Image (cartoon, rainbow, N blue to C red):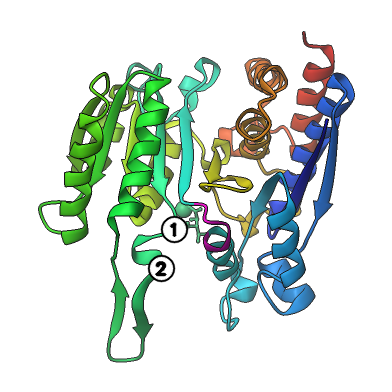
Amino acid sequence: MAYKITSLAGDGIGPEIMASGIKILEAIAAKYNHTFEIESHPFGGAGIDAAGDPIPPETLKSCQNADAILLGAIGGPKWDNAPKRPEDGLLALRKALGLFANIRPIQVPSSITHLSPLKKEIVENTDFVVVRELTGGLYFGEPKHWDDVAAVDSLTYTRVEIERIIEKAFEIASTRNKKVTSVDKANVLASSKLWRKIAEEVASRHPDITLEHLYVDAAAMLMIQRPTTFDVIVTENLFGDILSDEASVITGSLGMLPSASHAENGPSLYEPIHGSAPDIANQNIANPMSMISSVSMMLRQSFSLFKEADAIDAATTRTMQAGFLTADLGGNTSTTDFTNEVLKQIEGGE
Ligand code: IPM
Ligand code: MG
């Protein structure tokens, strides 16, 4: 079967890790007889440079017509004062495609528990998913403006927006350890009061799943203190942004974590959770794990290519177990050497 993929390499280390992701796709295509039609388009800072727009119309059109979208990373100091920043393109893309459900799995492979800044006995067997609401809250609420004397952001959520993301979290929990932790600030925020009420309503429709509520400050603490007690965490846009970066540190590096963003209909988008790391761009030292795992998530969640995704995951595990580690994890394996080792493992694997 042929799958149409739009590739948005973006900025900074984006093109380097995208090259890794595409090599992995080519290896899977060859081994399992699939066709991936990959169309590349400028996006983020690269979009501004090519077409004066972080999301040029051609780029958006390609994304809308794709079966799935693979994104590298965007942003950098070069565009800090641009009238429209690279980040505006990402937010516009999420909104245009209705990508409300951002799934960020956090797992610590046993081969690298010693690289976590936390004690081995705390991180061992960590395996949870952050389900982040992605098209509402402070990121998009109106009014939103600032001048030299005052600034406004608006935190707005509707019942429909809250209910569908919490339902999504319960759906994911039903395939896992059947526990949902809903994170809010219901002791202060009005939007959180509605959030908590709806979480209870959704829970009553899923009696086999346990719901716990945590305030976001407590959640931030417990995630570091006892990460193994979480299964599915569901939270609003900004809390999810912050908590998922915090969670990534448990694995030892932000460079490890992939994500998937789903709409109610239409293509899903797969991207590392980290930024474009301009300080290490073009040095062939970025960790491509987050991108390779994003490819595996894409095969699994958009194309139902389970054995192909398993083959990628097994290959990356074996690569890390064999001691191939990039600089962020204290090793000296380059981006391309790491990728080549994963390719070798895919080609030689079951
Ligand atoms: C993320 C990023 C983005 C976000 C930025 C680049 C706008 O931090 O995907 O977590 O805040 O959502
Ligand atoms: Mg973030």
Q: Is residue 222 left or right of residue 105?
A: left
Kindly identify the residue that appears in the image at 37 percent across and 44 percent down. 165
Looking at this view, is 253 or 90 the one in front?
A: 90
* SS under mark 2: loop
* Residue 229 point in image, percent of width and height: 28, 23
Kindly identify the residue that appears in the image at 89 percent across and 25 percent down. 30
The reply to whether discs 2 and 1 touch (Cβ–Cβ < 8 Å) is yes
Q: Quadrant of the C terminus?
A: top right
Amino acid on which disc 1 is placed:
Thr
Label 2 crowd bin: few (<14), some (14–19), many (20+), radius 10 Å: some
Residue 140 tag number = 2
Q: What segment carries the magenta color?
A: 95-99
Amino acid on which disc 2 is placed:
Phe
Q: Specify which label sits upstream in the sequence, 2 or 1.
A: 1
Q: CA distance from mark 2 to mark 1?
A: 7 Å
Residue 324 tag number = none
Classify mark 1 as within 8 Å of ligand 1 or not, answering yes or no: no
* Residue 98 point in image, percent of width and height: 52, 56
Magenta-drawn stretch contains 167: no
Single out the residue that lies furthest toward the bottom: 148
Q: Label 1, on which residue? A: 135
Looking at this view, is 81 or 162 the one in front?
A: 162
